[in-house]
Amino acid sequence: MEFRVTFSGSRRAARTLWFLILMSLCLFITVCRASSPQEEEDSAMQNIVTEKRAEESHRQDSADLLIFILLLTLTILTIWLFKHRRFRFLHETGLAMIYGLIVGVILRYAVHVPRDVGTASMGCFVNISPATLLVNISGKFYEYTLKGEISANLVNDVQDNEMLRKVTFDPEVFFNILLPPIIFHAGYSLKRRHFFRNMGSILAYAFVGTVISCFVIGLLMYGCVMLMKQFSQLGGDFFFTDCLFYGAIVSATDPVTVLAIFHELQVDADMYALLFGESVLNDAVAVVLSSSIVAYQPQGDNSHTFEVMALLKSFGMFLGVFSGSFSLGVATGVVTALISFFTKLRDFQLLETALFFLMSWSTFLLAEACGFTGVVAVLFCGITQAHYTFNNLSPESQDRTKQLFELLNFLAENFIFSYMGLTLFTFQNHIFNPMFIVGAFLAVFVGRAANIYPLSFLLNLGRRYKIRSNFQHMMMFAGLRGAMTFALSIRDTATFARQMMFSTNLLVVFFTVWVCGGGTTQMLSCQRIRYGVMGLPHVQDENMKVGVDSDQDNSMGLADGSERRSTKQESAWLFRIWYNFDHNYLKPILTHSGPPLTTTLPPCCGPVARLLTSPQAIENECQLKDDDSDLILTDGDINLSYGDITVSTDAMGAHTNSGRSFSGTATSDDLDRELAYGDHELVMRGTRLVLPMDDSEPPFSDSIRNLRM
Amino acid sequence: MEFRVTFSGSRRAARTLWFLILMSLCLFITVCRASSPQEEEDSAMQNIVTEKRAEESHRQDSADLLIFILLLTLTILTIWLFKHRRFRFLHETGLAMIYGLIVGVILRYAVHVPRDVGTASMGCFVNISPATLLVNISGKFYEYTLKGEISANLVNDVQDNEMLRKVTFDPEVFFNILLPPIIFHAGYSLKRRHFFRNMGSILAYAFVGTVISCFVIGLLMYGCVMLMKQFSQLGGDFFFTDCLFYGAIVSATDPVTVLAIFHELQVDADMYALLFGESVLNDAVAVVLSSSIVAYQPQGDNSHTFEVMALLKSFGMFLGVFSGSFSLGVATGVVTALISFFTKLRDFQLLETALFFLMSWSTFLLAEACGFTGVVAVLFCGITQAHYTFNNLSPESQDRTKQLFELLNFLAENFIFSYMGLTLFTFQNHIFNPMFIVGAFLAVFVGRAANIYPLSFLLNLGRRYKIRSNFQHMMMFAGLRGAMTFALSIRDTATFARQMMFSTNLLVVFFTVWVCGGGTTQMLSCQRIRYGVMGLPHVQDENMKVGVDSDQDNSMGLADGSERRSTKQESAWLFRIWYNFDHNYLKPILTHSGPPLTTTLPPCCGPVARLLTSPQAIENECQLKDDDSDLILTDGDINLSYGDITVSTDAMGAHTNSGRSFSGTATSDDLDRELAYGDHELVMRGTRLVLPMDDSEPPFSDSIRNLRM
C-alpha cells in the first residue's frame, strides 16, 4: 500500500511539475514583454527622461536576469524528475543547454521588442579610443565607459537587436564570477587519496597531454585552414597562432557529465581520480597555454611569422604565469591555514566560514591584480585549503564550506551551460563554416587520441599495474568540452578567426556533452568497467567504488593486500618523499591534525618544535600518555614508508577497531590508510600503531620526555 | 594547567593576529601600488594598447575589490578577538566602519597614483543623453555606455582622482546586490512566535511610527533649512519635498548592534521581537515612502508647490507599490512552498537548496522588473519561506539555507559598513553644513521620540500588559541608523540637497552605531531590562530569554499561566482569526506539517480535501491510528482558540512529555505552544492533546473514517 501512495504521489508530482514548467515559461515571456518600455510621458524635463531611461534599463536588466533564474529553476525541476525516475541519459548540464536553446529561439524569433533609439552615433577625432568619455551634451557633462569595439558592418544591427544584445553578458563575467567557484570547488573536492596515488599519471596527462593535444589540434586545423584557402572558403585571416590558440582552448576537458554518472554508478575510484584530476589540471594548463599563445608577438611588421625569441618569451610566460599562479594559490591557502591554526575561530563558525570564503576569493583577486591567472590560483588554493585548512576547521564549518561551494559550483555550472544554449541563437556574429567544423571535430578527436593512447602506453611502462585499454577508451570517450572551453572562446570574439572558433566550439561542446555525456552509461557497460578496479578488472572490491565518500569508506576495509601493494609501487618514486615531508613537517605546522613536531623533528630542534607545535597537538600527546591505547594513529604513527620496502610493526600486537575488525594482513597499508585518514574526517580512532621505522625519530617515550622538559 | 595552556595559546594568538593584520594592511597597500599602471611599451599597434588598457582596468578593479576583501578579513579577525575576550563595546559593524575609515584616509592622503589620461572630453549636439554611444574613432566603431551625469565643476576632478573614483561603487550595487540578502535574512530569521504575538504593536510602530517620524523629521528639517536661509548658510536649493525625503530615508532603523547584544545577553524575547520586527518592517516602509515622495510631481512649472492631486498620486503609489511588492513576495514564497510540497526535492538537498535560493532571488528580480520594490518583496518572501516552505525542506536543507543566508547577510552587512567608513573620505562631493548637521541630529532624535512614546502610550491603552517605560527608553535608544539609510542616501547624490543629506546621514550612522550601539550594554543594565519580561519585569523566566533558539526553548516550559494569558489577550483581536485560517487551511495546503485538510475542512468538502492533502500528512494520520499515543500535536489538535475564552481539554487526561514534565496547569496555552511548534523544528513529539472545541470539525475517529472511505 505504501508503494501505491508513493507511486500516485510521484505521478501527481510529475503532472504538477509540467504544469509549473509551462506556467513559468509563460510567466517569464510575459515578464519580458511587460518590461518593454512604456511610452514616455510628455514631460519636457530632461532629468525625468534620463531617470526614466535608467529605470527602464534597470527593469530590463532585472527581466533578463530573471530569464536565467527561471531557466535554472526549470533545469532543477527537470533534473529532479530525471533523478526521481532514474533517467541517466541526460545530465543536468545537457538539460540546461537544451532549455537555453529553447529560450534562445524564443528570444530570437518570437519576442520582438520595439526599442526607442537610445543609441547615437558620433564621429570623433581622437586617435586612441579612451577608456572613459566625457560628453558635453547641451551644457551638461555625461560620463561614458568603453564597452568594446564593434565591427563597422554591425553598427546598424546594434540598434536593431537591442533585446538580443541585452541578454548577452560581458564575457569577462564568466572568467571573473562564474568560473572561479567552479574551479575552486573542483580543487576543494578532489578526492585527495586517489589523486595523490595517481599523481604521476595525472600530471603527465594534464601537462604533457594537453600540450600534445594543443599542438596536434593546432597543426590539423592549420592544414584544414590551408585547405579552405585552396577552396577559397575562408572569409578572413586565420593565422597559425590562431590555430594553436584554438588547439589550446579546445584542449580543456570537462567530463562533469561523465563524472556525475561515475559517481552515481559507483565506478572505480582510481579511474574517477585519473579523469577528474586530469580534467581539473588541464583546465589550468589550457588557460595559461592559451594566454601564452596570445602573447606570442614577434617583433616587426610581419607579426605572424616564426621567431625564436618570441617563442621563448611565450614559453617563459607560460612558466612564469603558471608557477606564479600556483604559488599565489598555495600561499593564500597556507595563510588561511595559519590563521585558522593560530586563532580560535572555530568557536564561531560563521566567522570561520566567512573568513574561508573571503580568503579563497582574495586568491583570485590577488592573482588577477598581480597579472597572474586567477582561475589557476584558485584551483591550487582549493587543493591547499582542502589539504591543510580543512583540518583546522570546526566540523560545522567543514560542512558549511563544502556545501557552500557545492551550491556555488552547481549554480555557476548550470548558468554557464544554459547561457551556452542561449548564445547559439542570440550571439550575433556567428560564423559557421562547414569545412572548419568538420575539421575541428576531427582534430578534437585526433588530439584527444594523441593525448591518451601514447601517454598511457608510456605510463604503463612505468606502472606495475597498467592503465588497461578499456579504461583508455573510456578516457578518450570522456574528453568532453565544457565551461572552460566556452569561457575561453567567448572571451574575445573580435576577429573573424575568433568568431569562427567560438561558433565551432559551441557545436563541439553541444556534441560532446549530449552524445558523449549521454552515452556514458552505455559506454561503461560496453567497456565492462563498472565496478571493476582499473588494474584488476575482476576484483569486485566494494571499497574501490566511488561512493558517497570513498575516502572514508576505504579506510575501513583493507583486506586486499595485493591490490594495495600496487598503489605503493605506483606512487613510490614521485610521491613518497613529498608525502613524508608534508606529513612530518607541513601538516604539524599548518594544522591541528598532524603529529606534534616534537616527535618528527630531530631532538636538537626541540625548542623550535615546541614553539611551533599547536597546544592541541601537545594536548593530544598528553592525552596519549593518560590513555595509552588511543589516538596515536591520529597524531603519532607514520614515518613508515621511507625507502622502497615498507614495514609496519604493530607494537601492541593487535588492532583495535571500532566498527569492523581488520584481517591480520595489515602490513604496509599505512601510507594508504594515513591518506584516507588525513582526508577530511577521522572516522575511526581505535587503532594503535607505533612504528619505530625512522631512526631520526626518537622513541616515543623520549619525545614525551622532551615535551615535558 | 589546562587553563594555562589556553591562556598562553590565546595570548600568542592575539600577537599573531596583530602581526597578520599589519601584514595584510601592508600587503594590500602594496597591491594597490603594484597595480598602478606600468609604462606602456612603445608599440604602435593600437589594438595592443586598447587591450592593455582593458587589462589594466581589470587589474585595478581586482585590486580595489581586494581592498574590501582584506578589510572584511581584518574585521572578521578583530571581531573574533573581541568575542574571544568578551569585549562588547564595539560591534562588528562599528568595527568595519573604523577599518573603512582608516583605509579611506590611506587611499585619500597616502596613496597617490599617477594615472595616464584615459579620458577624453568631447562636445556633442544631441539634445538627450543617449544610453549607448557609438563613437567612430578613426574608422573603427567603439561602443560606450552611459555611466551618469557629472556636474560641470567636477569635470577636472574626474581626471585627477581616478583612484578615488575607482573604489566608488555604483550606488545601485547596494540596492541590487547587497541589501536583498540582508533583508531576506531578516525576514527568514524573524522569530515568528514572538513576532506574531506582538504583531499589532509591531505594525503600529512600523507603519504609523515611520510615517510620523518621517513627517516630524521633515518638518523640523524644513524649519532648519528656513533658518539656514535666514543666515544665508544654504548653498543650493532645498525644497520641502527634499526635507520629507530626508525624513523618510533617515527613518529606517537598523538596530543590528543592539540586537546582537540582546542576543548575546539573552534579553527578553518579546522586546527582541518588537525591536527586530519594527526595524525590519520600517525598512520596507521607508523605502516605499521615500520613492513615493520622490514621485511627488505637481503639474506645471512651479514644481515644488503643494498640490492635492500629486499628493494623492504619491499616496496611491505608496499603497500600490507596497501592496504590490508584498503580494509578489508572498506569491513567490507560496510558489516555492508548492513546488517543494508537490515534488520530492527533499531527496536531493543540493537541488532543494539551489531552488530555494533561486526562487528567493527571482522574487527580487520579478519585483524590480514589474516596477515594484525588490527589497520589500524579498522581505515578505523571506517571511513566507520561513513560515511555509521551511517546513517542507529536508533537515539538511533547512540548515543549509539558514547558514547560506546567514553568511550572505554577514558579508553584505560588513561590506556595507566598511564601505560607509571608506566613503567618508573617498566620496568627493561631501557637503558638511554644521547647522544642517546639528538640525538633523536633533530632528532624528525628536522624530524617534515622536514615534515611540505616543505610540507606546496608545498601544498601552489596548494592551493588557503594557510596554513599560524602561522598555520604551530602550526602543528610543535602539533607533540606530544603518545600511538602509546609507543605501537610500547614496542612491542619488546628484543635487546639492542630496549631497548634503548623504554627508549628514553618514555622520548620523557613525554616531548612532558607535555611541548608541556601543552603549547598549550600559543602557540595558541602567534600564534594568536584562532578563526581565517586558510586562512583568520581575519574573525571571528562563524561557523568555533570547537564547540560541528561543522558539524551541520556550515550548518546553509552559509553567507561568498568568504571563501566557497576557499573550492571548494581546494577540486576540487582530491575530487569532488569521492564525486559525492559516493553521487549518494554508499550512495543510502548502506544507507537510499542518493537520490533514480532511480533518479541518467541513465533511462536505471531503473529496477536495483528500485531493489537496499531502500523502505525508495522510501517512501521519495513518501512523496515528497505528500508534495512538503520538503525533497528534503535530498534525491534529488546534481549533482551540476561537472566541475570547479558550478552553482546551486533554482527552487522554495526561500529558506525556519526552524531556521535562508539564505542570498540570496547561490550559489555554495551546496557541502559544502551537506557534512554538510550528517554528522550524518539532522538538518534542510526545504530547497528545485532542481538543473537540470547534463543532465544524468531526470527531477524530470520524475524520479517519472519512479518510479511509
Image (cartoon, coloured by chain):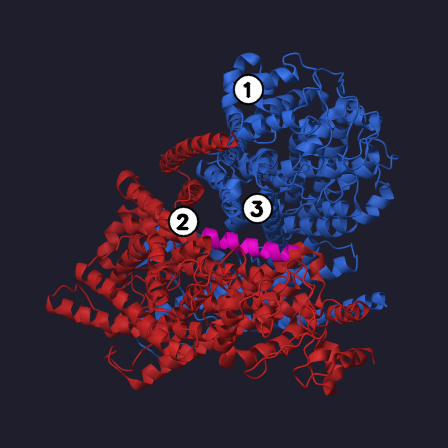
Chain colours: A red, B blue
- Tag 1 secondary structure: helix
Magenta segment: does it hold A407? yes
Q: In which image quadrant can residue A301 be found?
A: bottom left
Pointer 3 local density, CA inside 10 Å: few below 14, some 14–19, many at least 20: many
Q: Amino acid at mark 1?
A: Arg
Q: Is mark 1 in CB contact (under 8 Å) with mark 3?
A: no
Q: Is residue B413 left or right of residue A141?
A: right
Magenta segment: does it hold A550? no
Q: In which image quadrant can residue B370 be found?
A: top left
Q: Amino acid at mark 2?
A: Glu
Q: Given this view, does label 2 or label 3 mark the residue nearer the observer?
A: 2
Residue receiving disc 3: B181
Do marks 1 and 2 both belong to one polypeptide chain?
A: no
Q: Residue at x 76, y 17 (%)?
A: B647
**Of callouts 1 and 3, which one flags the residue occurring earlier in the amino acid sequence?**
3
Range of magenta residues: A396-412
Q: Chain of mark 1?
A: B
Residue A365 seen? no
Residue receiving disc 1: B708
Q: Is residue A406 left or right of residue A106?
A: right
